[in-house]
Amino acid sequence: MWIEHQQRRAPEAGFLHQYPLSDRIDDLKGKSVVSTSGSTNIKQLTETNAARNLGVNIIPAKDHGEAFLMVETDRAVAFVMDDILLASFIAGSKDPDAYVISKEAFSKPEPYGIILRKDDPDFKKVVDGATAALYQSAEGQKLYDKWFMQKIPPKGLNLNTPISAELKHQFTKPSDSPDPDSYTAM
């Protein structure tokens, strides 16, 4: 299979927490932190915990909802997950102002994409051309703003997630590279 031009923003595994905890990974030292069982994010948390000798008590949650609930009910101080998923939980919470997504991330941006059949290069070329044209047009930014900066149906939640420098760069030069280093802002 091929990965078509990367979609949306380049998400990072950050962590969500309630105030007043700082947004530095090292400040999680010795604390209980939750992430979703089986996710890339719990693997990143485990590796970072070991590499930095943080002594974090890692709590595996059965799903994202349970993980957020653990922070909401003070059973964990932070939830490690993709930033856009964290933004959706904050937007749907009882008190969105009580939460913040860390600036420091557990990973480099990891692109989301559309998977296409590998045996159809003509179709890939059409899709790459169409998505590149959209990204490079004014409509690309308008669509981003519609879904990530404004209220969205059915609940009217606003993810309030400004376009990142990495995604702005991708809009100007779309790529199908699986290498996270190719998604850094220039």
Image: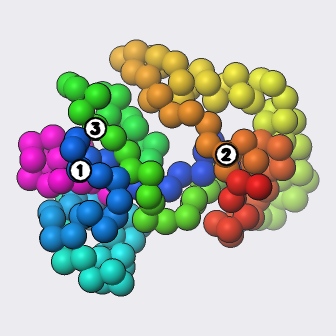
Give the SS element for disc 1. loop
Q: Which residue is located at x 55 percent, y 64 percent?
A: 108
Q: Amino acid at mark 2?
A: Ala
Between residues 169 and 132, which one lies in front from this camera angle? 169
Give the SS element for disc 2. helix
Q: Is residue 88 above or below residue 32?
A: above
**Which of disc 1 and disc 2 is earlier in sequence?**
1
Which residue is disc 1 drawn over? 21
Which residue is disc 3 drawn over? 99
* Residue numbers of the magenta segment: 62-81
Considering the image in quadrants, where does the C terminus appear?
Answer: bottom right
Which residue is disc 2 drawn over? 165
Position of residue 5 in the picture relative to residue 84 (left or right): right
Residue 55: name its quadrant.
Answer: bottom left
Q: Is residue 28 above or below residue 143?
A: below
Between residues 28 and 161, which one lies in front from this camera angle? 28
Which numbered circle lies on residue 81?
Answer: none
**Which of disc 3 and disc 1 is earlier in sequence?**
1
Q: Amino acid at mark 3?
A: Tyr
Q: Is residue 67 visible?
A: no
Residue 156: name its quadrant.
Answer: top left
